[in-house]
């Protein structure tokens, strides 16, 4: 029994030691796996943390980008609205400028028309240059109108009324440039009515007042005719000689020569 026990003991001790060694190795193996797991867990945690932080950063960046994009769109919209407002204001101002230009042009036109109308009215009262029987002089509008009206009466053959209107003209416009012509036509109207005395007085007045007048030679010839009608042959001869002496190159001088030849 003792031998068996001893044998048992001798065989059991190494087994126990072996079991202890195995237990120790197993324990060491278990310890290494735990650290590895912890390391893996720590690594996973760090990775998760990094992922979370990265996701957060990406989310924050995306949010900021979205906010920036929104702000940019808002700014673009505001800028577009401002541009539209500026264009509208510019169009309004352009319209106002165009209206002002039209108003100015209309005002200038009205002013020009008013000035023209005023000038036209003023010219009705202001003397103007006229040319009658080769003479240029200033005449008032009424003066010109009355002379032309009197001459129109004479040309119609109404010598009686022509005498009246020419006498009235000479009395109203004593210093008129029309006076020599008016005297001639007055004398002619009187001659046509056989009023030779008054006619010769007006013909003589023309020659005395305007000897350089284009109608002066005709007036002398008409004066001589009046004298011949009144049987004043000597006076007529003298008048015809005056005509030839003063106006030898005139057309009336040719007629004067013919009358003189018949008077001799």
Image: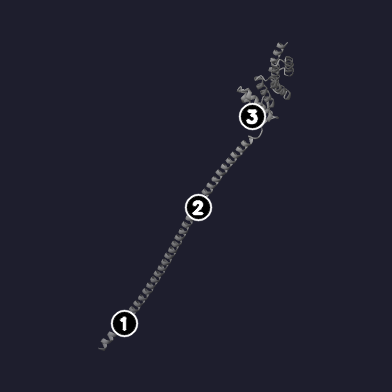
Numbered disc 2: secondary structure: helix
Numbered disc 1: secondary structure: helix
Answer with mark 1 or mark 3, whichever residue precedes in sequence: 1
Foreground of the two, 143 or 114: 143
Dividing the picture into quadrants, the one containing residue 165 is: top right
Foreground of the two, 223 or 229: 229
The crowding category of the residue bearing disc 3, from other C-alpha atoms within 10 Å (few below 14, some 14 to 19, many at least 20), is: some
Check the image and report above or below for 6 versus 164: below
Q: Look at the numbered discs 1 and 3 and tell me whether their residues touch, using CB distance below 8 Å.
A: no
Question: According to the image, what is the colour scheme of the structure?
Answer: one colour
Query: What's the distance in space between the residues labelled 3 and 2, CA to CA?
Result: 70 Å
* 1 vs 3, front mark: 3
Instruction: Mark yes or no: residue 212 visible.
Output: no
Question: Which residue, as the protein is rendered here, is positioned at the far bottom?
Answer: 2
Instruction: Mark yes or no: residue 226 visible.
Output: yes
Instruction: Tell me residue 49's x, y (percent).
Output: 42, 68
The crowding category of the residue bearing disc 2, from other C-alpha atoms within 10 Å (few below 14, some 14 to 19, many at least 20), is: few
Q: What label does residue 41 carry, if any?
A: none
Q: Quadrant of the N terminus?
A: bottom left
């Amino acid at each position: 029994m003792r031998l068996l026990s001893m044998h048992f003991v001798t065989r059991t001790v190494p087994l126990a030691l072996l079991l202890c060694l195995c237990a120790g190795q197993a324990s060491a193996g278990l310890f290494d796996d735990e650290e590895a797991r912890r390391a893996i867990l720590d690594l996973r945690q760090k990775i998760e943390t990094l992922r979370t932080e990265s996701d957060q950063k990406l989310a924050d960046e995306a949010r900021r980008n979205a906010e920036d994009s929104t702000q940019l769109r808002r700014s673009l919209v505001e800028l577009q609205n401002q541009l539209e407002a500026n264009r509208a204001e510019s169009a309004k101002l352009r319209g106002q400028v165009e209206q002002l230009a039209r108003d100015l042009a209309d005002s200038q036109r009205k002013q020009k028309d008013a000035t023209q109308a005023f000038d036209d009215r003023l010219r009705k009262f202001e003397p103007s240059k006229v040319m009658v029987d080769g003479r240029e002089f200033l005449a008032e509008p009424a003066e010109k109108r009355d002379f032309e009206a009197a001459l129109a009466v004479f040309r119609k053959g109404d010598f009686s009324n022509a005498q009246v209107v020419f006498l009235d003209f000479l009395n109203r416009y004593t210093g008129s440039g029309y006076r020599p012509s008016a005297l001639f036509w007055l004398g002619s109207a009187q001659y046509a009515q056989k009023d030779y005395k008054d006619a010769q007085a007006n013909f003589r007045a023309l020659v005395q007042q305007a000897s350089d007048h284009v109608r002066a030679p005709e007036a002398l010839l008409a004066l001589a005719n009046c004298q011949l009608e009144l049987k004043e042959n000597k006076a007529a001869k003298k008048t015809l000689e005056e005509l030839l002496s003063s106006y030898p190159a005139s057309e009336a001088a040719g007629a004067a020569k013919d009358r003189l030849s018949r008077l001799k």
